[in-house]
Amino acid sequence: MAYDEELADRIRDSLGPEVAHVVEKKMFGGLAFLVGGNMAVAASGQGGLLVRADPDATGALLRAGAVEPMEMGGRKMTGWLRVTAATVTDDDTLDEWVRRGVDFAKTLPPK
């Protein structure tokens, strides 16, 4: 499945002026948005959104619902979350998830 182009456009809109400092790269079957060379958020090839979040906060985010851990090769990736497409139909909710990913990516050393 190809990533959702409409969702990718909405992510760009959500990034606002910051989009000028973000690099887009096809990754994981989707379109990733990188800050300082670190993935912040992606329009997933499996639908919905992938978000990089503070590993210390992921437990609480998972308990809040509408998200699940990202799995790669059968392994759950700590600090990486899959947000359902239904969860981000609302622009305000999408903005929150995009901001969470960007804010965390900014804490990481540039690549």
Image: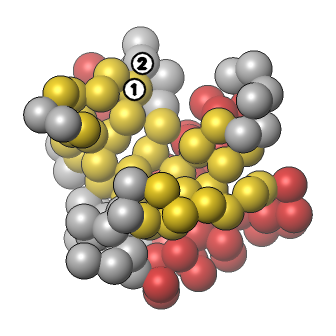
Tag 1's secondary structure?
A: strand
Q: Quadrant of the C terminus?
A: top right
Q: Residue at x 61, y 61 (%)?
A: 25
Q: Residue at x 25, y 66 (%)?
A: 46
Res 85 quadrant in image: bottom left
Across and down, in percent, residue 101 comes to: 56, 42
Across and down, in percent, residue 55 comes to: 42, 18
Q: Residue at x 47, y 84 (%)?
A: 5
* Side of 88 relative to 22 (left or right): left
Q: Are marks 1 and 2 in contact (CB under 8 Å)?
A: yes
Across and down, in percent, residue 92 comes to: 51, 65
Residue underneath mark 2? 55
Across and down, in percent, residue 87 comes to: 29, 63
Q: Quadrant of the N terminus?
A: bottom left
- Say which mark, if any, is on residue 79: 1
Res 81 quadrant in image: top left
Q: Reply above or below: 45 against 64.
A: below
Q: Amino acid at mark 1?
A: Gly
Front-most of residues 75 and 16: 75
Tag 2's secondary structure?
A: loop
Q: CA distance from mark 1 to mark 2?
A: 4 Å
* Side of 44 relative to 42 (left or right): left
Front-most of residues 111 and 40: 111
Residue that sits furthest to the top in the current view: 56
Q: Reply above or below: 81 against 77.
A: below
Q: Amino acid at mark 2?
A: Pro
